[in-house]
Amino acid sequence: MLASLTFPRIIGHRGAAGAAPENTLESLREAKRQGAAWVEFDAKLTRDNHIILLHDDLLDRTTSGKGPAAEATFAAIRALDAGAWFGPAFAGAKVPTLEETVRELLALGINCNVEIKPCPGRERETAERVMRALQRLWPADAVKPLVSSFAYSSLQVAYQMAPEFPRAVLVEEVPAGWRDLCEGVEAVALNPWHEPLTPDQARAIKSAGYRAYSYTVNETARARTLFDWGVDGVFTDAPGKLIAALGA
Ligand code: G3P
Ligand code: MG
C-alpha cells in the first residue's frame, strides 16, 4: 500500500489556518492558493448526525456560537459565523459539511487528511459516518485521503469498515506501545506532535516501515530539522512559506 501513496511533505493544517479561518472552505481555497497539494481538517458530528468541520468540542472559539457542538443541530451551527472571529474579510464564512468539503477539494484538485475528531463518547459513530461518507463521495479511481485520529476506537472502526482508506495513528508523545497501535489498525503512518519528538523516535518509526507526519510546524528551520530526522511531512498553518523555503 505504501508504494501507492503520494503524500506531499507540506500539508495545510485545517486548510491554511494562519491565513484564513480554520476548517472553512475559505481556508481550503487559501491552502490551494499557497500551493498545498494536501490539506488536513477535523471532522465531527452535530447533534443530528451531520458531519461538519470543527476542531474544538465547543463552538465558542471559532464561531459566533457557544456551547458543545454535539448539542447543537446542523441548522443552528450553519446559521453561525465561522469567519468573523479571524478577521472582517472572512465575515459570513460558514461551518462546512464533509460533503461540501470533499466536493470543494475535488474541484480544487487537492487531496486531504481527514482527522476524525469525535466529540467525547461519539468515537465509533463518528468514524462510521465519516467512512461511509468518504466511501460514497470519494472517486474510486482517485488517490484516497489519509484518515487519522487520536481516538483509537475511531481508527478501529475505520479499519473494519473501510480498510481501503489508509490510516495514521495520531499521538502527542510517542508512546512505548506505538508499534502495537499501528499494527492493530494496519496504519501506514504514525503522526506525532513535533515538540516532544526525538530523532531516535523518528528513526525508529521509519526503520519499522511507517511514515511519520508531524504537527503543527510553522517554522522553516524546525521543518528542516524534522526532515533531516526522516520525518516524511509536516502539517503547517503556513504551507506557502514552507513550500517556498523547502519545496512541496
Ligand atoms: O492531524 C494533525 C493535527 O491536526 C493534530 O492536532 O489538535 O490540530 O487537530 P490538532
Ligand atoms: Mg487536526
Image (cartoon, rainbow, N blue to C red):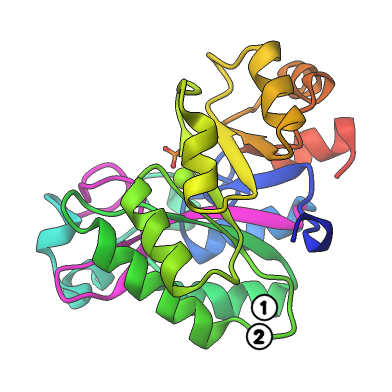
Q: Is residue 57 within the magenta segment?
A: yes
Quadrant of the image occupied by residue 98: bottom left
Closest to the observer: 17 or 136?
A: 136
Q: Position of residue 73 (x, y in %)?
A: 15, 72
Residue segment shown in magenta: 36-65
Is 40 on the left or on the right of 73, as rendered? right
Main SS of the magenta part reads loop
Residue at 34 percent of width and 72 percent of height: 128
Q: For residue 139, which numbered disc appears in the image?
A: 2
Q: Secondary structure at mark 2?
A: loop
Horizontal and vertical percent for residue 18? Answer: 57, 38
Q: Nearer the viewer, residue 179 or 67?
A: 179
Give amino acid for label 2: Pro
Q: Which residue is more in the foreground, 217 or 8? A: 8
Please indicate, yes or no, whether residue 45 appears anywhere in the rendered image: no
On-image quarter of the N terminus = bottom right
* Residue 24 seen in the current view: yes
Q: Residue at x 29, y 45 (%)?
A: 56
Q: Which residue is mark 1?
A: 106
> Could you tell me which residue is drawn at 74 percent across and 42 percent down?
10
In the picture provided, is 191 more to the left or to the right than 73?
right
Q: For residue 163, what is the image quadrant? A: bottom right
Disc 2 crowd rating (10 Å Cα; few below 14, some 14-19, many 20+) is few
Task: Identify the secondary structure beneath mark 1.
Answer: helix
Answer few, some or many: residues within 10 Å of disc 1's Cα (few below 14, many 20 plus, some between 14 and 19): some
Q: Is residue 229 above or below residue 84?
A: above
Mark 1: which amino acid? Leu
